[in-house]
Image: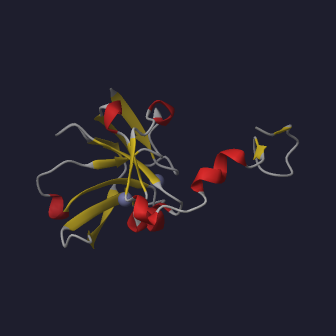
Amino acid sequence: MQIDGRCLCGAATWTADVDPRKVVACHCTDCQTQSGTTFRTIVPAEEGSFALTSGSLRIFTKTAESGRLRDLAFCEACGTPVYGGPGGGGPGFLSLRVGPILQRAALAPVAQVWCRSAMPWLDRLASLPRIETQPGANTARERS
Ligand SMILES: [Zn+2]
Ligand SMILES: [Zn+2]
């Protein structure tokens, strides 16, 4: 399927083709740190399909635990993570970040990776009280 990406500030937009059967949730500490959250949902772009349609990206090159270099691309204006890829823009697939993809609801993970660093409380999330928007807003409260 074709996806459309859009960063938080709207400056960067991109398109790519992905296979929804290849979506994974990554619990590695790099994903936790750079995404600013508990885990990151990712999907590989089909080879050569990624196209930046507006804006510009900055690249931070990180040395992975394997010793390989990884290019981490993000919107230079607002910092929204866009993809991770081979160091120096070398050959290999780009790992798209699902968060800023407009079709993200259709991209459910089929597996979890790097579970050794997964947060131990994740399994309890589904049983917590649910609030539809910001706490204190005039909204109904639901419990599952
Ligand atoms: Zn942006
Ligand atoms: Zn990761």
Q: Residue at x 47, y 36 (%)?
A: 104
Quarter of the image for the C terminus: give it.
top right
Q: Is residue 74 above or below residue 45?
A: below
Q: Whole-percent x and y of residue 143?
A: 80, 40
Q: Position of residue 124 (x, y in %)?
A: 65, 52
Classify residue 71 as left or right of residue 128.
left
- Viewed as shown, does residue 41 lie left or right of 15? right
Specify the quadrant that holds the N terminus. Answer: top left
Q: Position of residue 34 (x, y in %)?
A: 44, 65
Please name whichever residue, 21 or 118, is drawn nearer the observer in this view of the structure.
118
Residue 119 falls left or right of residue 12: right
Which residue is rendered at x = 73% and y = 49% of the image?
128
Task: Please give the count of numbered marks on the rendered protein.
Answer: 0
Please tell me in which quadrant of the rendered image residue 119 appears: bottom right
> Residue 3 appears in which quarter of the rendering?
top left
Asked if 67 appears above or below 112 in the picture, the reply is below
Q: Residue at x 42, y 68 (%)?
A: 29
Q: In the shown orientation, is residue 106 left or right of residue 19?
A: right
Instruction: Determine whether 108 is above or below 9 in the image.
Output: above
**Identity of the residue drawn at 21% across and 70% down:** 66
Q: For the view shown, which residue lies furthest in the left direction?
A: 91
Locate ligand 2 by image quadrant.
Answer: bottom left
Residue 98 x/y as whole percent: 42, 44
